[in-house]
Amino acid sequence: MAQITIQKAAIKLLKQNINLRKHEKVVVVTDRKNCPIFKAVCDAVKLMKGNLTEIHITKNRTHSSPLPKLEKTFIQNDVIIAITDKSISHCPETGIARKKYGVRVISMVEVDKNLFLKAMRVNQKKIKIIGNKLSKKLKKCKKVRIRTPSGTEIKVNVIKDAIDVDDGDSTTRGKLNNLPYGEVAMAPINIVDGVVAIDFSRVNIKPEYHVKLILRKGKIIDYNNRKAKNFVEYLRKIDGEKALKVVELGLGTNPEHKSLVGKIIHDEKIIGSAHIAFGGFGNKRKCKIHEDVVLLKPTIFFDKKLVIKKGEIL
C-alpha cells in the first residue's frame, strides 16, 4: 500500500474500522500534549460531520485504572477513540459504555505517528482470516499448553465464552479494538499453572533478564530473580494480591509485526507470539491495573493439536 498522510490515515480509521456515520457522537480522549494523532482524528471527525467531544485526562494513572468522571460522557457517545500513553481499554467506565450502551471503541496506547501510519497500512482482511481461524480452533479445545525457548511452560484452561478476536473491526455495537490490532484473546481467565518466562514487559523487562514467574491456580506464587521480584512488587503495590492474578491469554496475529519495538501495544500483536496479562478486565475482574507480558517464539498446543510452532502459525 502506498504511503498515506496522517490525516488520510485518520479518515481511513473512521471509515474502515469504525464506520462512522454522519452526526454520530464521538469522544476523542488523550493524556498527551500537542499530539498530532489526536489532532488528525479530531479533524477527521469534523470532516465526516461527526459530533465531536475532545477530552484531556491526566497521565498520572496506571493502565486501565478507573475514570469515574468520564462515565457519563462515555455512555452519551456512540464512539470512543483513545490516543493515550495509559490505556483505557479495561477501565470499568469503558466496559459499561460498551456492554450496556453499545459504544464502539478504538484504543491507541503508546502509538506514535509512525506506528499509527504503519497500523493503518495493514491488510485488515488478512488479519481477520488469521484471527478467525485461531479462534475457531481455540473454541474446540479444553486446554492450551505453551512453551517458549526462554523457559515458559504453562497450561491454561479454555473458557469458550471469554474468547474474542481483535481484528480492527469496531463497526458493530459494543466492539472494542486496539490499534495496532491483531490478536485472539481470552479473558477473564482463572486457571493457569506453570512457569512464565517474560521476554518483554513495559516494566523494564527484556529477554536477557531471564525473568521467570511461578504460577499456581492463576496466581504468581514465586519468582526467580531480582527483576522478577521488582515486577511482582510493582503489581502488588498498585492493587495488592489481586494484581498478581492472571486475567488474560492472547495470541498475536498481525503479520506486519514480526519483532519487538519496545511498545506493548505493538509487541503483543507480533505474529505467532503469545502474551499473558495480570490484574483486571473491566467490570468482569476489577483491579486497578492490567499488565501484559510478551512471550516470544512460543510452541502452542490446543489440547494435543500443534497450532503454533516456534512462533509460526500452522
Image (spheres, rainbow, N blue to C red):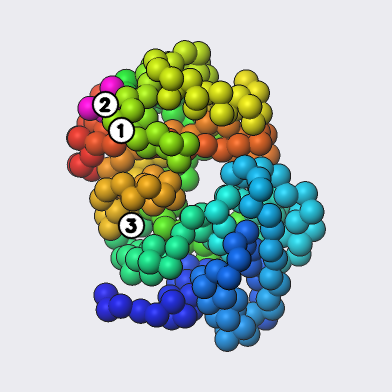
Q: Amino acid at mark 3?
A: Ile
Relative to 102, is 298 above or below? above
Depth order, front residue of 287/169: 287
Q: Position of residue 176 (x, y in %)?
A: 55, 55
Q: Position of residue 290 (x, y in %)?
A: 56, 38
For the point 44% across and 29% down, the residue is: 158
Residue contact between numbered discs 1 and 2, judged by CB atoms under 8 Å: yes
Q: Residues within 10 Å of mark 2 (few under 14, many from 20)?
A: some
Q: Position of residue 250 (x, y in %)?
A: 41, 39
Q: Which residue is mark 2?
A: 150
Q: Which of pointers 3 and 1 lies earlier in the amino acid sequence?
A: 3
For the residues labelled 3 and 1, the Cα–Cα distance comes to 27 Å
Q: Which of pointers 2 and 3 lies earlier in the amino acid sequence?
A: 3
Which label sits in the foreground, 3 or 1? Answer: 1
Range shown magenta: 146-151
Q: Is residue 120 visible?
A: no
Q: Is residue 238 visible?
A: yes
Q: Position of residue 303 (x, y in %)?
A: 31, 25
For the residues labelled 2 and 3, the Cα–Cα distance comes to 27 Å
Q: Which residue is mark 1?
A: 207
Which quarter of the figure is the C terminus placed in? top left
Q: Is residue 5 left or right of residue 287?
A: left
Which label sits in the foreground, 1 or 2? Answer: 1
Q: Residues within 10 Å of mark 1 (few under 14, many from 20)?
A: some
Depth order, front residue of 248/172: 248
Relative to 7, is 280 above or below? above
Residue 147 counted in the magenta span: yes
Q: Is residue 97 left or right of residue 309?
A: right
